[in-house]
């Protein structure tokens, strides 16, 4: 003869099932929030890199690759490293800065320039000879870009500091331009 399970064991199974469903709903809720507030995919690249005497100029392209998240840039800075020890701080055109919120799937160009000898950075003979034009003018520089950004999908996130390194930027003959920067 078949035995009827006691009501207590049936209640225990229902409690366990309800608890598992509750945990599943909580995990789904947390995953949805973390995906929606995750940082957008942004990238930087260098275009139109030129030099005349001691003045370096280039266009920094800030691209928001996200499909739905807007990006706001709080600050933007760049450094030109023409050797492992010599660097030049670059000035970013903040008057024509990026819009308050850069929409998804959008690229914005920012003019950047630097003047060698304007500041007292560490320098070496190779870097100075290259700027003076006495060394080979095929030296590749590294441009380091640092940005403080906020992401917005409904609510704005906390600020993130994004650093990108652009290798093999040649200001003298423009080969390899535009240069896509990689995250550091």
Image (cartoon, rainbow, N blue to C red):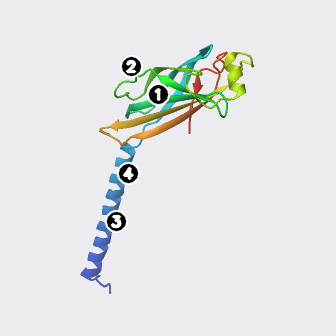
Q: CA distance from mark 2 to mark 4?
A: 39 Å
The quadrant where residue 35 appears: top left
Judging by the rendered image, the residue that carries numbered circle 3 is 20
Locate the C terminus and report the quarter of the image it occupies.
top right
The mark lying in front, picked from 3 and 1, is 1
At 34% from the left edge and 36% from the top edge, which residue is drawn? 152
Q: Position of residue 123 (x, y in %)?
A: 65, 29
The residue singled out by tag 1 in the image is: 63
The quadrant the N terminus occupies is bottom left
Mark 4, residue position? 31
Q: Residue at x 40, y 18 (%)?
A: 96
Residue in the picture at 34% in, 48% down: 33
Residue 114 image point, x, y percent = 54, 21
Helix, strand or loop status at disc 1: strand
Most extreme residue toward the left, as rendered? 7
Instruction: State the image coordinates of residue 124 (x, y, percent, origin top left).
Output: 69, 29
* Marking on residue 95: 2
Q: Indicate which label's residue lies in the foreground, 3 or 2.
A: 2
Label located before the other in sequence (3 or 2):
3
- The Cα–Cα distance between marks 3 and 2, rounded to whole angstroms, is 55 Å
Q: Earlier in the sequence, mark 2 or mark 4?
A: 4
């Amino acid at each position: 003869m078949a035995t009827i399970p006691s009501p207590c064991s049936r209640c225990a199974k229902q409690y366990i099932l309800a608890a598992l469903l509750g945990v599943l709903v909580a995990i789904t809720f947390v995953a949805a929030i973390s995906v929606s507030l995750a940082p957008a995919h942004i990238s930087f690249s260098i275009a139109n890199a030129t030099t005349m005497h001691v003045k370096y100029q280039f266009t920094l392209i800030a691209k928001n690759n996200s499909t739905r998240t807007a990006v706001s840039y709080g600050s933007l800075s760049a450094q030109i490293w023409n050797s492992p020890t010599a660097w030049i701080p670059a000035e970013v055109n903040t008057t024509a800065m990026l819009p308050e919120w850069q929409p998804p799937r959008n690229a914005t160009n920012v003019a950047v320039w630097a003047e060698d000898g304007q500041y007292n950075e560490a320098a070496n003979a190779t870097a100075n000879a290259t700027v003076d034009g006495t060394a080979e003018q095929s030296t590749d520089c590294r441009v380091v870009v640092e940005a403080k950004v906020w992401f917005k999908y409904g609510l704005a996130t906390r600020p993130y500091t994004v650093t990108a390194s652009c290798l093999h930027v040649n200001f003298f003959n423009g080969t390899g331009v535009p240069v896509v920067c990689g995250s550091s």
